Image (cartoon, rainbow, N blue to C red):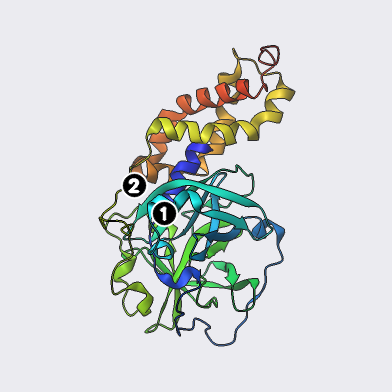
Amino acid sequence: MRLTQRLLIMFLMIQFTNLGCKSTSKKSEVKQIIGTDDRVLVSDPEILSRIGLLDVGTHKCNASMSSPNTISTAGHCLSDVGLDNVTKFHFTTADGVVSKVIRPISFDVKKDIATFQIDQVSAKYFKISNKSSVSDAIIVAGYDEKSDSWLQSSCKIEEKMADFAAMTYECDTVVGMSGSAVLKGLNLVGIHVAYSKSLNRNLALDLSSVTVADADIRKFPNTTKEWGPKLPCWCCNGSCDVKIPTPSFDWAIEAVAKPVAAQLAGQAEQGGWTKLNCVSLSAGAVYAATTGYSVPICAVMNVAAPACVGFLTASGGVITGATCVQLCQDRRLSDCKKEN
């Protein structure tokens, strides 16, 4: 899971426009209510525990739990924030859980998504999904500053455009809701980023197209002015071409081990797993836990989609071994409970 987290983070950290920030600065006049405003209060506790606000000091942005210890948001929400202040950021879920941001994980200018590691590990997070289709029922859920409420709107995906890594829909949003979760069940299929005047539709980063190298959501025609005129970037303190390095595989292994171990803790104790049999007994369960994050994991590790399954299979032994080490450290293996 932690490997998943890292990968999810990288996957999610693509950059968008300023529509997703709850800002104390100037406000846009652009509306994204399409027809009748059909937004309602978010009442599902499973959603409320996974969405929240990222406080970057000058303003707040909608963001979502994208793995056990990462959050993702629209990159343009951070266009006026320097990397040196990241450790001062904090994330608060809609149900009130507060976490500190540790560091940025990944960033993609073309796709306007940003992902951060936080100091809390939670079992409440959205699974990143690359499985969405036109006509799928979705909801867009996020914070509305004007009403001081967490609201959601239901609709269907109307169009998917891989060249832009974008999807369009009629779900209602308002200024400040960029970074909001686009959900299919409890799967995160997109991140709300803009409004298209020409189409009179709202627009999201389509997470199923994130691995399309040339896809560039910035080129989507006739979106609101909040896309520009200058691309937002991590450049407040100098160079506008700051590169956040791809996480190492070792880091990814470390990142996935703790959450997976926590998930398998009960099974390990009930099954009497030991240091000798842990790898053989846990292999299937560990693989099942990581495959749900295959797209973000492979995106972070720069593995092309066609090779992703093979990559996960080949690295499964390493991930399983790291998970067993973590289970031992957590005193979940029977012969590790006796160790000091």
How many neighbours does mark 2 have within 10 angstroms: few (below 14), some (14-19), or many (20 or more)? few
SS category of the residue bearing label 1: loop
The residue shown at (63%, 72%) is 151
Residue 185 to residue 269: above or below:
below
Residue 196 to residue 81: above or below:
below
Three-letter code for the amino acid on which mark 1 is drawn? Met
Residues 309 and 40: in front is: 40
Q: What residue did someone put label 2 on?
A: 244
Question: Could you tell whether 149 is left or right of 7 in the image?
Answer: right
Disc number lying in front (1 or 2)? 2
> Quadrant of the rendered structure where residue 301 is?
top left
Query: In this view of the protein, can residue 223 be seen by the observer?
Result: no
Q: What residue did someone put label 1 on?
A: 13
Residues 240 and 281: in front is: 240
Q: Residue 194 — which label? A: none
| Mark 1 in CB contact with mark 2 (< 8 angstroms) | yes
Three-letter code for the amino acid on which mark 2 is drawn? Ile
Question: Please, which residue is most extreme toward the bottom here?
Answer: 35
Question: Could you tell whether 90 is left or right of 148 in the image?
Answer: left
How many neighbours does mark 1 have within 10 angstroms: few (below 14), some (14-19), or many (20 or more)? many
